[in-house]
Amino acid sequence: MISDLPKTSRSLPIALLRARERVMRPVRAILMDVGITEQQWRVLRVLEEEGPQDPTRIADGACLLLPSLTRILQKLEEKQLISRQPDPDDGRKQVVSITQAGTQIIRDNLGASQAVFEAIQAQMGADRYELLLDLLNELHLDKTD
């Protein structure tokens, strides 16, 4: 046993993974009933929130690698939840938009998703919940890579 390593309960990567699993487990159950994955949900949310955009921006906003996004966009297009058109300024690029069906999936399930986060907020307290979001966003914004 290596004694100078921090306990896994004090390991940031493990704590983040545990927290992510705690948050995503009930969300996955909601999405499973709808027939979409959490990655597809994130893409739809980014498009609904920020409007039509190119895949690189979507990948960044949805925290996905571009090769993974390519497959996700294909599935979402097959389900008619997004549409893709050539970029009017550069025909080599494409612009992705959410369809009305995609927007409807978000509307139909946003309440259940919000309830998950409201329960976590109630458990933690509103101030600590907001502090957690601020700290995590601060960690994200400190891009040193």
Image: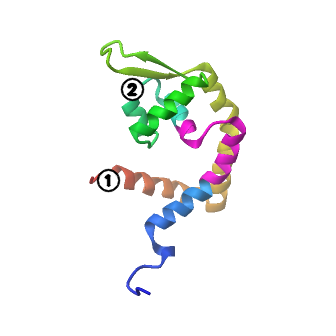
Q: Is residue 11 above or below residue 116?
A: below
Q: Which mark is residue 142?
A: 1
Q: Main secondary structure of the magenta part?
A: helix
Report if residue 139 lies within the magenta region.
no
Q: Magenta stretch: give its range.
A: 24-42
The kind of secondary structure element at disc 2 is loop
Q: Is residue 81 visible?
A: no
Q: Determine whether, in the image, residue 54 is placed left or right of residue 37.
A: left
- Pick the front one: 60 or 65: 65
Q: Quadrant of residue 81?
A: top right
3D distance between C-alphas at marks 2 and 1: 24 Å
The amino acid sitting under disc 1 is Asp
Residue lying at 54% horizontally and 34% vertically, measured from the top left: 45
Q: Position of residue 135 (x, y in %)?
A: 43, 57
> From this viewpoint, which residue is outermost toward the top?
88
**Mark 2 neighbour class, 10 Å CA radius: few under 14, some 14 to 19, many 20 or more:** some
Residue lying at 63% horizontally and 36% vertically, measured from the top left: 36
Mark 1 or mark 2, which is nearer the start of the sequence? Answer: 2
The amino acid sitting under disc 2 is Asp
Q: Is residue 18 above or below residue 59?
A: below
Q: Position of residue 113 (x, y in %)?
A: 66, 43
Report if residue 38 lies within the magenta region.
yes
Do tag 2 and tag 1 residues touch (Cβ < 8 Å)? no
